[in-house]
Amino acid sequence: MTPHFQVTFHTPLGWIRAVSDGTALIRLDWEQSRWDEPDKPDDVSCETISQLKAYFIGDRRFFDLPINLKGRSEIARHWLNIMMQIPYGTTVTYKEFAAAAGRPGAPRAAGTACASNPIPIIYPCHRVVKSDGTIGYYGGGSSLRSDNEKNVTHKIALISLERQFS
């Protein structure tokens, strides 16, 4: 069993926990309250939180972190790599995201890629919105449903944050 390391950070939108396997980031969790487990830091989880803190104050637009997508299919990795290319401070529709991934007729698959994103913010699924311009849903690493008002509020806040610093 691979050891896990984690560091938590309180954002204006709740708690974030960076989880690493000791060599790469494997997950980013987001909750309204702090977890019961104590932090077990390593270099990767600490650097992730450092970069996220800079992101939240507008000092970072790109992330430079080792990421492990072990267990993700080739197509899931493809979607995440395309997602990473969505520019800071902008939004694209699920249809545009699907087209960029080479699957123009698959906006639902684009939505599934966003919903199953294990590392939100770093892989910016919050930048993908509905074709009519409305926000859509957001799982964002939370245990809450993606249509939960708190999660949708996170998505709106992240888009607003990036537009503020663009």
Image (tube, rainbow, N blue to C red):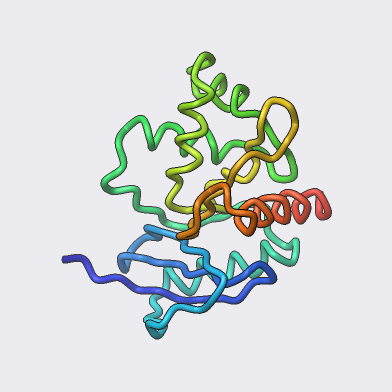
- Within the image, what quadrant is residue 88 found in? top right
Q: Is residue 90 above or below residue 121?
A: above
Horizontal side of 132 relative to 5 (left or right) equals right
Residue at left offset 58%, top offset 36%: 85
Estimate the x, y position of residue 84 in percent, counting from the top left.
Answer: 55, 41
Residue at left offset 31%, top offset 68%: 22
Estimate the x, y position of residue 136 in percent, counting from the top left.
Answer: 64, 39
Front in this rendered view, residue 54 or 154: 154
Q: How many marks?
A: 0
Q: Is residue 57 above or below residue 113?
A: below
Front in this rendered view, residue 159 or 122: 159
- Within the image, what quadrant is residue 27 found in? bottom left
Q: Is residue 10 above or below residue 28?
A: below
Estimate the x, y position of residue 24 in percent, counting from the top left.
Answer: 37, 60
Going by the picture, which residue comes out furthest to the bottom?
38
Front in this rendered view, residue 67 or 127: 127
Residue at left offset 63%, top offset 59%: 150
Residue at left offset 74%, top offset 67%: 57
Estimate the x, y position of residue 133 in percent, counting from the top left.
Answer: 75, 31
Q: Quadrant location of the N terminus?
A: bottom left
Going by the picture, which residue comes out furthest to the top?
105
Horizontal side of 52 relative to 82 (left or right) equals right
Front in this rendered view, residue 145 or 24: 145
Horizontal side of 58 relative to 140 (left or right) equals right
